[in-house]
Amino acid sequence: MLRTRPFFVPVLILCAAESGLAAAAPRYQCWILIDFDAVFCAPCLEPLIAFCRALPAAAQDGRVLGIVVYRAPASPGEEGRRRKIVEAKWDGFHKAHGFRFPAVLDDGPVFRRWLDKGAAKVLFFDGPARAIREFDLPLRPDRFDEMLSLLLN
Amino acid sequence: MIKAKIAGFLAGLIVLAWPGRGSAPEVIRSVALEEVLSVGTLDDGALVQWTGIAADPSGRIYVLDALDYALKKFDSRGRLLLKTGRQGQGPGEFSAPRALALNGDRIYALDQSRPGLLVFDTELRYQGTIYAPRPLSMIASVSPGRLAVAGITLVGQPARIFFIDREGRVLSEFNYLDKVEFYLADSINTAADAGGNLYLAYGYQDRIEKRDGRGRILWTWSLSGSAAVETDTYRAGGREILIPKKLFYKDAALDRQGHLLVLCGGQTRHPSRDVYVFDLSGTRLAMFTLPEPSHCLFVDDNGFLYARANEGLTVKKYRIVYR
């Protein structure tokens, strides 16, 4: 089950992308997928911070969305507490860095599948090409420039 | 004559009752933790992910917060008094804050992304940096004006512990490993007693040991009785890197009753919660379990134990009750 808040996340577009079909541009062009349970070690954290800091404020406002993927606890009674912990920690980290983009929390399987090779990655909806591009972090400078030009144009 | 006999009898009783070398190990039937303070909640924003901790004799608590890139000071009731630091590499800034030690009126903060130690006073004013040739992985306060530190060591190199004074001058040093055989083999958690002895709990080896101030091993202990280490092999840049599979011990602390407490990692029934209690001659006396997983264990001068809760959003302070 996919659960996110406070924004509606268009799962159908992701499914379409996985099956090789064209996707319409969603409200947020750039999705930063973050594996909450794996990202908070220095080697994983540094590329994520570097990427987020490099995003100009103009690009972050309204175009970038963080999707914080976490594992729900096995015991059902602990679900709410775990979600609060994830929310509080992400919120504190977000504030400490002055990131502007909003984020949603997700404990479902859809986005987790995209994080099988790293603790964070970027999905970019390339409207003109009618495709979703996938970027692993750390990004090479030329790929960052490419993504930024798509985001700002 | 009768007085002499009574005196001799009393002296014998004292000798029998006095815990010392050769005496029977203390018996602990159970260990209970009574929570006396909780700092940081799920929604007050006081802590984000705390890592290092220290407390002064008045109960004021100093905490390094890794995800808030800050050093924080709380009063004895858990109210935030002061906060300093931000993310960065400049003076008084943090990138990967991990551990701290309080020694006299100074706080020494260890940041794994930069060599050396950041020094603050107890009002959290930045005093300067003690430079070291490489980032440090361990710090422990030994006695007034004396700290023990260890650096992150490359594979193939000897791993060393340095005793330094409050200005960072090296007083003495010794090898605790003649050669680091695999990545993280040098990972240790350390407590120091009043006699200058160190208790080392290895992170990725099944090994706990006591060494004197010169580095001589006084005793060793292991859970499995085996020194073998299981590793995975990774290839990077044309080289093979050996990574240990198992985390054994996460932290070590001494209480006021003369017990060594060792927080176990993933090899016991309750990962990151089980704590072994040893006497100082290396006999395991008891085990207790923390209410929640913790990465660290700290005991202050008044004997209170501090551990993590809510995945680092909360510091819990407990009274330890031995029965």
Image (cartoon, coloured by chain):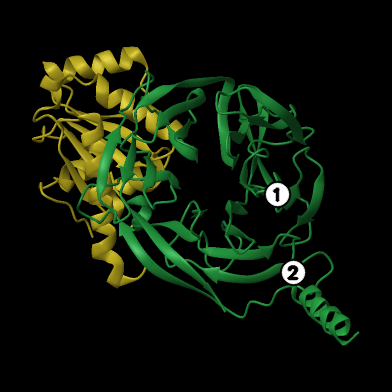
From the viewer's perspective, is the residue at label 2 or at label 1 nearer? 2
Horizontally, residue B117 falls left or right of residue A35, namely right
Going from N to C along the chain, the mark reached first, 2 or 1, is 2
The residue at which mark 2 appears reads as B19
Chain letter, colour green: B
Q: Residue at x 47, y 60 (%)?
A: B305
Horizontally, residue B37 falls left or right of residue B214, namely left
Q: Position of residue B187 (x, y in %)?
A: 63, 40
Amino acid at dot 2: Pro
* Label 1 Cα crowd, 10 Å radius (few <14 / some 14-19 / many 20+): few
- Is residue A19 visible to the viewer in this orientation of the structure? no
The residue at which mark 1 appears reads as B230
Between B219 and B214, which is closer to the camera in this rendering? B214
Q: Residue at x 84, y 83 (%)?
A: B3
Q: Residue at x 38, y 19 (%)?
A: B91
Q: Is residue B232 above or below residue B159?
A: below
Quarter placement of the C terminus of chain B: bottom right
Amino acid at dot 1: Glu
What subunit carries mark 2? B
Q: Position of residue A107 (x, y in %)?
A: 27, 55
Q: Residue at x 79, y 33 (%)?
A: B178
Q: Position of residue B16 (x, y in %)?
A: 80, 77
Chain letter, colour yellow: A
